[in-house]
Structure formats: C-alpha cells, structure tokens
Image: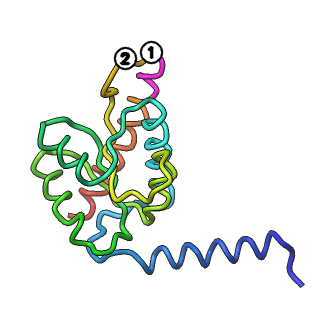
Amino acid sequence: MGSDSETEKTAQKEREKKKLLALAPIAKPLAGKKLCKRTLKLVRRAAEHKCLKRGVKEVVKTIRRGNKGICVIAGNISPIDVITHVPVLCEEADIPYIYVPSKEDLANAGATKRPTCCVLVQTKPAKGELSQEALEKLKGEYDQVASDISELANSMF
C-alpha cells in the first residue's frame, strides 16, 4: 500500500506524459524542464511588472511594430495553424522564441485564467516606469533566459 505522496507523484508523472503526447510536431525548440521553469518564472515576473503581451494578435502586432522581447509559445495548441506564422515573424525580427509544453502553465505564469497560445516578454512596461531595482532584476532574468534560448536554438539548427 503506497503513501499519498507516491500517489501524487505518479499522478503528476501521468499529467506530464499527457502534456508531452499533446505536443505539436512543429514545437521546436522545446524548453527542457529547467529552462521551462526559468522561462515561466520570467513570464510571471513580467506579468507582475506589466511587461507582457498576451495572445497571438497582440504578440504579432507588437512584433510588426518593431518591439523586441522573448516570445514564449505553447506547444499543445490545436489547431496548430493558429500559431504557425509566429516563429517565422520572430526569426525575421531577430526575436528569440521558445516552446513550452503546456498552454495552461503559460496562462498561469502570465496571470490569466484562460489558456494562452503565446506571450511576448518585454524589458520595459507599456505604461509607466519601473523602479531601477525591479528593472535590473527583470533584465538579468531576461538576459539569462535569452542566452539559454539562443544556445538551444544554435544546437538544433
């Protein structure tokens, strides 16, 4: 007879397997566990400081206007046609992008209840100003995640 913690662990492993099975075939470069955790933490911090664009429409509009950032795309979107043009736009604008396994996790990190297809993390807020300390902390995390993403992308292509 197993303990409750063992039951929880097996249930969590089952959920992770289901997430990986639901991934789209174009979800590359896909963040590993560590990078995924770090990326979602960056998204959470950006949401707190209002430095986040949510949804395909808003992200595409921001990229076309020439703003920079890190694009985080969910890998389990159905139909996949909704987001197939976003990586192409990111590559043309030299914006690093990464896929994470779950749109639900991306929405939780982005402080919304609705599952989110993609978000764009920026270093400065759309309105107002950030304190110098908060800006430096956000910029430090941003730079670290951006370098990890570019390293992963370079190893793939």
Q: For the residue marked with disc 1, what is the amino acid?
A: Ser
Tell me, for residue 109, which label it has, or none.
none
Q: Secondary structure beneath disc 2?
A: loop
x, y percentage for residue 130?
41, 19
- Indicate whether 104 appears above or below 38: below
Residue extent of the magenta highlight: 132-137
- Indicate whether 47 appears above or below 30: above
- Name the residue tied to disc 2: 129
Tell me, for residue 131, which label it has, or none.
1
Camera-nearest label, 1 or 2: 2
x, y percentage for residue 51?
36, 33
Q: Residue at image x 44%, y 29%?
A: 49
Q: Residue at image x 12%, y 43%?
A: 64
State the separation of the CA atoms marked 1 and 2.
7 Å
- Indicate whether 157 appears above or below 64: below
Q: Quadrant of residue 22?
A: bottom left
Q: Given the current orientation, which residue lies at the most extreme front position?
A: 114
Q: Secondary structure beneath disc 1?
A: loop
Q: Residue at image x 25%, y 46%?
A: 58
The quadrant of the rendering that contains the C terminus is bottom left
Asked whether 72 falls inside the magenta stretch, the response is: no
Query: Is the stretch drawn in magenta largely helix, strand or loop?
Result: helix
Q: Quadrant of residue 154?
A: bottom left
* Residue 19 shown left or right of residue 80 in the figure: right
Q: Residue at image x 36%, y 64%?
A: 30
- Cβ atoms at labels 1 and 2 below 8 Å apart: yes
Q: Quadrant of residue 132?
A: top left
* Residue 119 shown left or right of residue 9 in the figure: left
x, y percentage for residue 23?
38, 75
Q: For the residue marked with disc 2, what is the amino acid?
A: Glu
The quadrant of the rendering that contains the N terminus is bottom right
